[in-house]
Image (tube, helix red, strand yellow):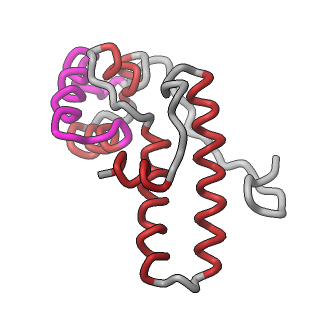
Amino acid sequence: MSRIHGGRKGRSGSHRPYPLTPPSWETLDAEEVGEEAVKLSKTGLSPAQIGAVLRDSYGVPSARSVTGRRLSALLKEKGISPELPEDFQALLKRVVHLQRHLATHPYDNSNRRGLQLMEARIRRLARYYRRRKQLPETWSYTAASAVLQVE
């Protein structure tokens, strides 16, 4: 498998195996993990940040092994889901940061190229999410809309 914007092949990274049963030393059950996830979500944290807080503060190694489903699916079931998917939101945030950088440094051509590649990635991901009905069919990327959606 090759990289998206690199002219070389890459090596796949290792993935943590997800056990089907929670560890024996786990003290929280599925309901308590769900309640904590909802509380943390209401403070404005993303599902990845919620997972890190659950891991670091509550000793939950994997919310998926305890609850049986991903945190984003759990939050969607509770009626708390962001309007944009988390990876899409992160890309938009990076694009806005690069746009601000290029406004003050207009001759930074390497970052201008990086911005073009990131915008292409956003368009590809938007096409995927429109097919999956996670974005409206009329949604399209513009630099101004990215600034509005991040802030």
Of 149 and 60, which appears nearest the observer?
Answer: 149
- Horizontal side, residue 106 vs residue 38: left or right: right
Image height of 18 relative to 43, above or below? above
Residue 5 locus on image (x, y percent): 74, 59
Residue at 52 percent across and 29 percent down: it is 138
Residue 140 locus on image (x, y percent): 54, 39
Residue 70 locus on image (x, y percent): 43, 24
Of 44 and 22, which appears nearest the observer?
Answer: 44
Image height of 4 relative to 69, above or below? below
Of 147 and 5, which appears nearest the observer?
Answer: 147
Magenta residue check for 46? yes
Dividing the picture into quadrants, the one containing residue 14 is top right
Residue at 32 percent across and 40 percent down: it is 46
Residue at 47 percent across and 67 percent down: it is 99
Of 120 and 24, which appears nearest the observer?
Answer: 120
Residue at 32 percent across and 26 percent down: it is 81
Residue 112 locus on image (x, y percent): 60, 72
- Horizontal side, residue 114 vs residue 59: left or right: right
- Horizontal side, residue 123 vs residue 73: left or right: right
Magenta residue check for 70? no
For the stretch drawn in magenta, the main secondary structure is helix
Image height of 125 relative to 83, above or below? below
Residues in magenta, as a range: 24-48
